Image (spheres, rainbow, N blue to C red):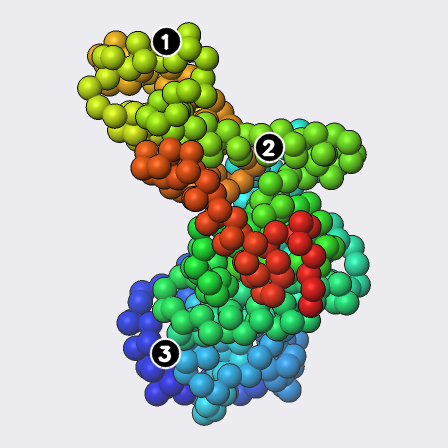
């Protein structure tokens, strides 16, 4: 036992928060091993020493390890690596001096924040519950919300050292078995010695590179439960409040939980408004570039004269003007996200108005394009998910490049290329363009 204890200390680099507490059990010397910064002292006392002191007070002669441990789960360990892994999971270990076996029991310290509505996914109607940074609590929220015996949970330990816990959740008989098996296989191949974060798992789940987001992420319990009932597979990791959903379609990223709770007519209206916002964010700037550089004849004569007069003081082509304003507005948007809410409102309003007005007076941009870029940004903010807004920004820049080279023809070529890629995407064998194209498999 002493040799094994030294090996455990070496694996943990003789960390000073590793504690060893010797005591007598059944006439033998035993050691309680734990990491004090990961374990709850009350759980250790309840699981071990409460029974131990009780037995000593009664002078019980026969008192073995099974009588000592009151934890719900007790595991025998014979390997040093498994012992270290258990310690890092917040478990306590008990071992006898004359034995090589160790007994692991749960004594994890729970520091869980209260359940609140996710800040980035607020809803007008619906629940206010969001995931927290604790795997068992998140699974409890899903089971309470779904309330079905068909909910199935599969645990995986992933990473180079197989020390990171991941939970895969699906509805048996509703989710396709091929999707479930492929999800398990891709996650099982994940190799990383660092912390497992949903962002890293997303790259592992994506088999094909794409400008479209292929893995849906959410912090809402009701959204996750709804997608599970529709046959999707959810992935949760410990120490993270983000839930990954596969397979995801384009339609998944464009809807919110409000759409399901307000009825079909209102839902269709909201979807229509979001699609208008997406089209404005994609095409407003590129159509302006194509019109001012190549196709003046599509506009009325008076409007063309007004636009040309506003461009007289701008010393460079409209494409440079567009790139400058897109960068400026994206910087303002990112600043409002990172700053505290009180400062964010001031920066967003004051920064947008003051900077835009100053750029027009200096002659960096035209006053007409200020209106165009404002419409484009408002359209992008209507998109409900941040992942889809990033996609819209990428395609917007591609359309700007096509419009600056070939005008309307460039916009058509870029649009055709994006649509071809869109209709050929099949993450996990499911068409990405559902419900436009049904699954033939």
Image position of 327 with respect to 8: above or below: above
Image position of 37 with respect to 123: above or below: below
Image position of 42 with respect to 390: above or below: below
Mark closer to the chain start, 2 or 1:
2
Say how many tags the image has: 3
Label 2 SS? helix
Within-10-Å neighbours for mark 3: few <14, some 14–19, many 20+: some
Question: From where the camera sits, is residue 129 visible?
Answer: yes
Q: Residue at x 69, y 68 (%)?
A: 441
Mark closer to the chain start, 3 or 1:
3
Can you tell which mark lies on residue 8? 3
Q: Residue at x 37, y 81 (%)?
A: 5
Image quadrant occupied by the N terminus: bottom left
Q: Which residue is mark 2?
A: 274
Question: Residue 23, how many percent across, how many down?
Answer: 48, 77
Label 3 SS? helix
Question: Residue 147, how many percent across, how many down?
Answer: 78, 55
Horizontally, is 16 left or right of 381 in the view? left
Q: Which residue is mark 1?
A: 306
Label 1 SS? helix
Question: Residue 164, how many percent across, how many down?
Answer: 47, 67
The answer for how far apart the CA atoms under marks 2 and 1 are is: 31 Å
Horizontally, is 155 left or right of 226 in the view? left
């Amino acid at each position: 036992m002493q040799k094994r204890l030294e090996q455990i200390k070496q694996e943990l680099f003789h960390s000073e928060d590793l504690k060893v507490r010797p005591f007598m059990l059944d006439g033998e010397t035993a050691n309680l091993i734990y990491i004090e910064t990961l374990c709850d002292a009350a759980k250790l006392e309840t699981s071990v020493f409460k029974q131990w002191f009780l037995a000593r007070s009664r002078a019980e002669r026969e008192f073995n390890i099974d009588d000592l441990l009151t934890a719900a789960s007790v595991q025998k360990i014979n390997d040093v690596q498994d012992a270290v892994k258990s310690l890092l999971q917040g478990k306590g270990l008990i071992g006898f001096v004359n034995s090589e076996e160790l007994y692991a029991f749960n004594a994890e310290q729970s520091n869980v924040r209260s359940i609140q509505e996710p800040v980035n996914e607020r809803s007008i109607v619906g629940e206010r519950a969001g995931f927290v940074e604790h795997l068992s609590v998140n699974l409890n929220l899903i089971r309470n919300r779904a309330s079905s015996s068909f909910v199935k949970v599969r645990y995986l330990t992933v990473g180079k050292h197989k020390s990171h816990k991941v939970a895969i959740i699906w509805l048996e008989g509703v989710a396709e078995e091929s999707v479930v098996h492929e999800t398990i296989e891709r996650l099982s191949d994940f190799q990383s010695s660092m912390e497992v974060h949903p962002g890293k798992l997303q790259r592992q789940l994506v088999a094909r590179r794409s400008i479209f987001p292929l893995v849906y992420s959410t912090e809402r319990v009701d959204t996750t439960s709804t997608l599970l009932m529709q046959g999707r597979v959810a992935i949760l990791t410990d120490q993270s409040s983000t839930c990954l959903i596969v397979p995801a379609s384009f339609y998944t990223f464009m809807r919110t939980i409000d759409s399901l709770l307000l009825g079909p007519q209102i839902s269709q209206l909201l979807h229509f408004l979001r699609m208008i916002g997406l089209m404005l964010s994609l095409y407003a700037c590129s159509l302006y570039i194509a019109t001012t550089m190549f196709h003046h004849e599509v506009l009325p004569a008076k409007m063309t004269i007004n636009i040309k007069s506003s461009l007289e003081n701008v010393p460079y082509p409209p494409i440079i003007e567009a790139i400058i304003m897109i960068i400026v507005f994206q910087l303002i948007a990112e600043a409002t996200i990172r700053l505290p809410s009180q400062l964010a409102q001031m920066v967003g309003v004051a920064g947008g108005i003051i900077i835009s007005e100053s750029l027009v007076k200096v002659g960096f941009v035209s006053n007409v394009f200020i209106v165009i870029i404002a419409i484009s940004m408002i359209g992008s903010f209507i998109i409900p998910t941040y992942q889809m807004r990033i996609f819209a920004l990428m395609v917007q820049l591609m359309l700007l490049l096509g419009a600056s080279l070939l005008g309307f023809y460039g916009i058509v070529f870029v649009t055709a290329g994006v649509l071809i890629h869109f209709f050929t995407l099949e993450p996990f064998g499911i068409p990405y363009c559902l419900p436009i194209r049904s699954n033939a498999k």
